Amino acid sequence: MPARRTVIFAGGELSEQFLRELDKEDFIIGADRGALFLVTHGVIPDIAVGDFDSISPEEFNLIEEQVPRVIACDPVDKDLTDSELALDLALEQQPEDILLFGVTGTRLDHTLASIQMMTRVLQRQIRCSIMDLNNYVTITGSQAIVQERGYTYVSLLPVTPEVTGITLEGFQYPLTNATLKLGQSLGISNRLVSPTGTVTILSGLLLIIQSKD
């Protein structure tokens, strides 16, 4: 039976705090340095994948000794980032949810690529989220429940040129049947006024970003 949730730890910014988000039933994938992070913190992923060019041979041996399935790729010939290789493996598990850690950081190109990868997951009708210490990002093409997670703001950003029929419930600044176009900042820095809020749209793809400074 497929795991309900697959969790990816990639090689970007990681924190021990993220380990508290794990459930014992999660299927866990470590991508490159993310696999080393897990192993050194006593969490054995189901799969480790990547070119492992950011770790030493000794660290790679540690991963090989503990992880049941290790997929090592040539860093020159591979076409995908380590995060996308991990995402492909996550999709094979056919989970209900995919949660990604370590896919944001100082490399803006990698961060944007990771956010764009979420559209692939949504096309498979699987929920997808990205979490770091300052942000929790989800994407919707229909309706999403936004839970209070300790972040200050909730911002809405269109992924497609236009998102229509946006209706917000449980927010400081509600919207009814609104439209957001790519490049507009109307959806920035809203706030929840209840434990959960509801975002409903009629067309397009919408990023929901919970954030704090």
Image (spheres, rainbow, N blue to C red):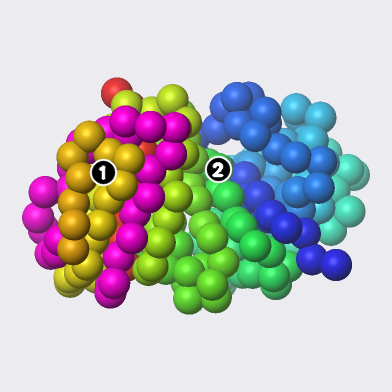
Where residue 156 appears, as percent x and y from the top left, is 25, 50
In the visual, does 55 lie left or right of 130?
Answer: right
- The answer to whether marks 2 and 1 mark residues whose Cβ atoms lie closer than 8 Å is no
**Label annotation for residue 132:** none
**Is most of the magenta stretch helix, strand or loop?**
loop
Whole-number angstrom distance, CA of label 2 to CA of label 1: 20 Å
Residue found 69% across the figure and 70% down from its top: 94
Where residue 24 appears, as percent x and y from the top left, is 81, 41
Of callouts 2 and 1, which one flags the residue occurring earlier in the amino acid sequence?
A: 2
Foreground residue, 187 or 109? 187
Residue found 9% across the figure and 55% down from its top: 184
In the visual, does 86 lie left or right of 102?
Answer: right
Work out whether 97 lies above or below 44: below
Work out whether 126 lies above or below 62: below
Quarter in which the N terminus is drawn? bottom right
Residue found 18% across the figure and 57% down from its top: 176
The residue carrying mark 2 is: 101
The kind of residue tagged 1 is Ser
Foreground residue, 74 or 126? 126
The kind of residue tagged 2 is Phe
The answer, for residue 137, to whether it is visible in the render is no
Quarter holding residue 61: top right
The residue carrying mark 1 is: 155
Foreground residue, 135 or 127? 127
Quarter in which the C terminus is drawn? top left
Give yes or no for residue 58 being in the magenta stretch: no
**What are the residue bounds of the magenta stretch?**
178-204
Where residue 173 appears, as percent x and y from the top left, is 18, 40
Where residue 142 appears, as percent x and y from the top left, is 38, 67
Work out whether 159 lies above or below 98: below
